[in-house]
Amino acid sequence: MRPNQSGLLQVTRLTGVMFSDGQFPDWTTSAGYKTTKPTSTCIEFDRALDNHLATARAARAMVIGDVVERFRPRRVLFLGMTVGGLLVYALALKQFHAPSISTLAMLAVFFAALFSSIAGFAFSAICGAMLFHLIDQPVEAVQIMMVCSVGGQALMVWHLRHAIDWRALAPFVLGAAIGLPIGVHILLHTPTDVFMRIIGTFIVLYAAVMILRRPVVVARQHAVFDALAGVLGGVTGGMAAFPGAFVTVWCGLKGWSKERQRGVYQPFILLVQIAAIALIAMPGLRLAHGRSFDFAGIEYLPAMFGGCLFGMGVFRKLNDRQFAFGVNTLLLVSGAALLV
């Protein structure tokens, strides 16, 4: 530290404490700094530093207290009661109505809904990583995820209905109307492994870069770019049942608030998923093994709704920076799921 012309001490990072005569002192303050003697200036500085450290400790305690408040016992108890209720519900269905119901699959849907609804997408990526190991028939697992995903998206869109910007949403939807048939054609007539790996690699790299650096905002924005993002979302929605990735990425690059971002890509995902199910469920259209679409996934909707309610509660407590981190983390998980 050096005294300036008015006698006040200035802080330096590397030299420790030094006065105008160039001599290093040997008197130690309570904060660990040294001076030549306990002058009034040094004492004032020591007190100011102590006050600053006390303020920092108080701020840190407030942060810790806020975290504890978010996970206070009452909420944990409510979460446990919800999980218990879902287990009873699944066992009752298994006993009296649907013997094929899996209690573990019910829990998988619940926790996938909880985590994915914090940012509003990636339910299929998270749930699929568990459900494909719990249900013997992959087609059945996909149908459960599609039905639950539409139900969850509808609930989240309802919660965000006041934040939906229909004018901003329109170019994305128009683009999806072009991209969705292309994605379905790729799904039915060409091997999708190569396309999915390319998309997964791009999403993983993008998410990793965005997690490690500061948020980026694109200066030039136009409705044409929105439509192009919608086209890509339609292609991936028809090809891999994953419509939200590119629209989510583009909304994040616009510098919008978390509510406005979800007010665009949340209804977009819902509309594309409804259109995809409508195409698959068309009369005469058959899936693998000659079976038509099965809506038995409706039985898992209570787990989906419960998880979404918890996730939306977490979403409301996040600031824009925390929300961006959550989005990029889920993008990373989603992209990795496409590479597996």
Image (spheres, helix red, strand yellow):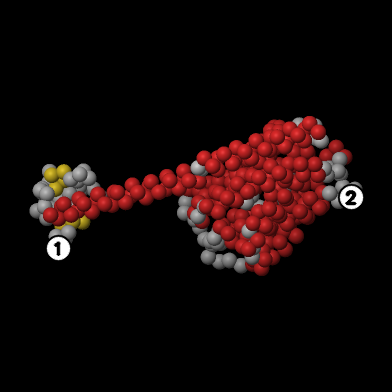
Q: Residue at x 67, y 63 (%)?
A: 169
In this image, 45 relative to 104: left or right? left
Q: What element carries label 1?
A: loop
Dot 1 or dot 2, earlier in sequence: 1
The picture places residue 312, in percent across and down from the top left corner, at: 60, 51
Neighbour tally class for label 1: few under 14, some 14-19, many 20 plus, Cα within 10 Å: few
Of residue 186 and residue 240, the one placed in the foreground of this image is 240
Q: Which amino acid does label 2 sit on?
A: Pro
The picture places residue 86, in percent across and down from the top left corner, at: 68, 38
Please indicate, yes or no, whether residue 313 appears anywhere in the rendered image.
yes
Q: Mark 1 — residue? A: 5
Residue 14: mark: none
Neighbour tally class for label 2: few under 14, some 14-19, many 20 plus, Cα within 10 Å: few
Q: Which amino acid does label 1 sit on?
A: Gln
The picture places residue 324, in percent across and down from the top left corner, at: 53, 53
In this image, 338 relative to 292: left or right? left
Q: Residue at x 64, y 37 (%)?
A: 83
CA distance for labels 1 and 2: 87 Å
Q: Mark 2 — residue? A: 283
